Image (cartoon, grey):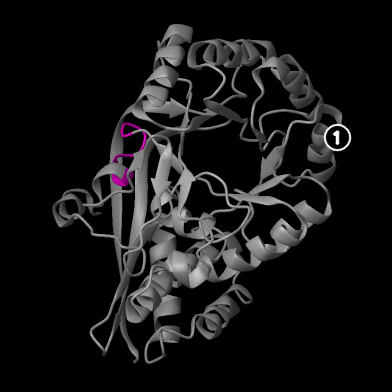
Amino acid sequence: MQITDLRTTLLAVPLARVFRGGTYEITARCTIITEVLTDAGISGCTYAGDERTRQRQIAEIIDGRLKPLVIGQDPLDVERLWDRMFEETIPHGDRATILQAIAAVDIALWDLKGKAAGLSVHKLLGGYHDRLPAIVIGGYYEDDKGLDGLVAEMVGYRDQGLAGVKMKVGRVDVREDAERVHAVRRAVGDRFMIACDANQAWTPEQAIEFCRLVEPCHIRWLEEPCHWYDDLAGMRRVRERTGVPVTAGQSEITKYGCQALVRGGAVDILNVDVSHAGGITEWRKIAAMAEMAGVAMAHHEEPHLSQHCLGAVKLGLYPEYFSEARDPIGWHLLKNPPVFRDGWLSISQAPGFGLELNQAFIERYRI
């Protein structure tokens, strides 16, 4: 079996309102669909990423630089193909963009690999868990939302059957953010998991103050608490002085950066995205390294992919959703989006990632 073609389709969907995190705001949702075709009639196709500022550059790298490297090659040789593509990072400076392009191709290759074997990617990777608790990323700062609106949002997630929320913090004063978390905890009760994501908004001292203020709320983790995602000493200080688990890795793009987080004692949980850090081939090496250190694995968004990765490792945690308003692509691009029930997501066992794309949605929002 040989690869005959590599295709990309770009999508962009404007959002109805602005969503603000600790250090950024979102006005649109974007993705790249990547398809690998073969002479055996088997194809691999998936979508990944939400890189609004470099979407076209990523597609240009796939179509211009990576396509000639994989045409005529055996698509099942994912390790060898990954190395061929990784050589493109050496003469070119923008490693983050190139690694996202590599990831898009690699993820599609794993979909094809699963289809060829008649197995889900979850099974190909090890198949440790059959289901995982599903959470939502929410609590964004929105115009005219207020505390009552925040509480109503969180109660709504609980009532939808989600296991918990990863709540945005970091945009307002530390004490005001702590009040927001306390209000949510009072409203949702003790069984609903709450994690907090500062998106690198604070100094270590501010993060420590926040953790102490919300101690009665029993948050599951604090994500990217410090200015710069690679402040190893700062994150280690937050861990050691508060006892609150620290999560980071979303902003890392290689196994080497993740290894530094683990060796530096900066994290309890790595939340590395397959769409940013080189794809499935690289992610599984990061997960193996983390397990040796007793560090759990999370994954920022993309539940259609993360369920297979997290479900295949012993210390895999929660697939993360967005609301429909925040991520219309995640809810409408697939005819069969991942469905959670009673707080749990049963991992798809269809071949590959088991995705069925909605062509009408693609035609409406392709760019």
- Furthest residue to the left? 360
- The residue at the point 40 percent across, 45 percent down is 345
**65 or 77: which is nearer to us?**
77
Q: In which quarter of the image is residue 130?
A: bottom left
Question: In the image, is residue 310 above or below residue 239?
Answer: below
- Name the quadrant of the C terminus: bottom left
Residue, x 58% and y 81% (percent of image)? 83
- Magenta stretch, residue numbers: 324-330
Q: Quadrant of residue 238?
A: top right
Residue 286 position in % (x across, y down):
65, 63
Residue 322 percent location from the top left of the image: 40, 37
Location of mark 1 (residue):
240
The residue under the point 36% across, 53% down is 31
In the depicted structure, whether residue 297 falls above or below residue 281? above
User: Residue 7, how many percent across, how many down?
Assistant: 30, 72
The type of residue carrying mark 1 is Glu
Task: Specify whether 106 is left or right of 86.
Answer: left
Closer to the camera in the image, 44 or 34: 44
Q: Is residue 321 among what the camera can see?
A: yes
Q: Dividing the picture into quarters, in which one does residue 195 lie?
A: top right
- Is 67 rendered above or below residue 365? below
Q: Is residue 328 magenta?
A: yes
